[in-house]
């Protein structure tokens, strides 16, 4: 039992670590409103292309976001059910104000 709790706590900590970054939270706040392409995310946040790619890759590696390709554009969306729930609350409390 304690091993399960410990493993789950470790997994939750890693998940939250993926969220715990101001730039990633800005990205996720925008994605909480719906799917966005990379250009929209850059324009809305002011995050440079190189940094945006790094943040999106981190979020993708953590299975927090996923994407689809449409010609040359990548469209990102929140994928992880827990991230969607958390970002809905954070969006209401911090992003929408």
Image (spheres, rainbow, N blue to C red):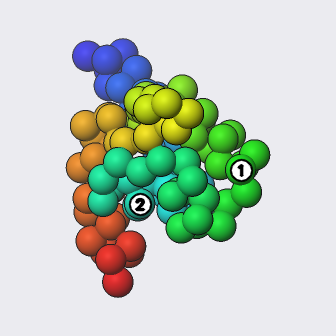
Q: Residue at x 32, y 77 (%)?
A: 96
Name, please, the residue furthest toward the front: 71
Q: Nearer the viewer, residue 20 or 75?
A: 75
Mark 2 → mark 1, Cα distance in angstroms: 16 Å
Q: In this view, does 80 lie to the left or right of 17?
A: left
Q: In this view, does 34 lie to the left or right of 71?
A: left
Q: How many marks?
A: 2
Q: Foreground: 86 or 6?
A: 86
Identify which residue is drawn at 53% across, 67% down: 44
SS for dot 2: helix
* Image quarter of residue 92: bottom left
Residue under label 2: 30
Using the image, determine if residue 55 lies above or below residue 32: above
Kindly report which numbered mark, 2 or 1, lies closer to the viewer in this rendering: 1
Q: What element carries label 1?
A: helix
Q: Which mark is residue 15?
A: none
Instruction: State the image coordinates of residue 45 (x, y, percent, origin top left).
Output: 58, 66
Question: Which residue is found at the position 65% from the left and 67% from the top?
Answer: 46
Mark 1 highlights which residue? 49
Expressed as whole percent of the image width and height from the top left, the position of residue 30 reads 41, 60
Quarter where residue 77 is shown: top left
Q: Residue 75's x, y, as percent?
A: 44, 40
First in residue order: circle 2 vs circle 1: 2
* Closest to the observer, 93 or 17: 93
The N terminus: image quadrant:
top left
Look at the picture and state if 2 lies above or below 63. Answer: above
Query: Is there any visible trace of residue 42 in the rendered image?
Result: yes
Question: Residue 57 at x, y = what percent?
Answer: 60, 33
Quadrant for the C terminus in the image: bottom left
């Amino acid at each position: 039992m304690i091993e399960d709790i410990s493993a789950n706590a470790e997994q939750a900590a890693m998940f939250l670590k993926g969220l715990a970054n101001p730039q990633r939270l800005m990205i996720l706040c925008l994605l909480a409103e719906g799917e966005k392409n990379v250009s929209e995310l850059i324009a809305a946040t002011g995050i440079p292309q190189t940094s945006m790619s790094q943040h999106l890759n981190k979020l993708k590696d953590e299975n927090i976001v996923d994407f689809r390709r449409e010609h040359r554009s990548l469209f990102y969306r929140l994928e992880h059910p827990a991230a969607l729930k958390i970002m809905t609350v954070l969006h209401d409390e911090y992003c929408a104000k």
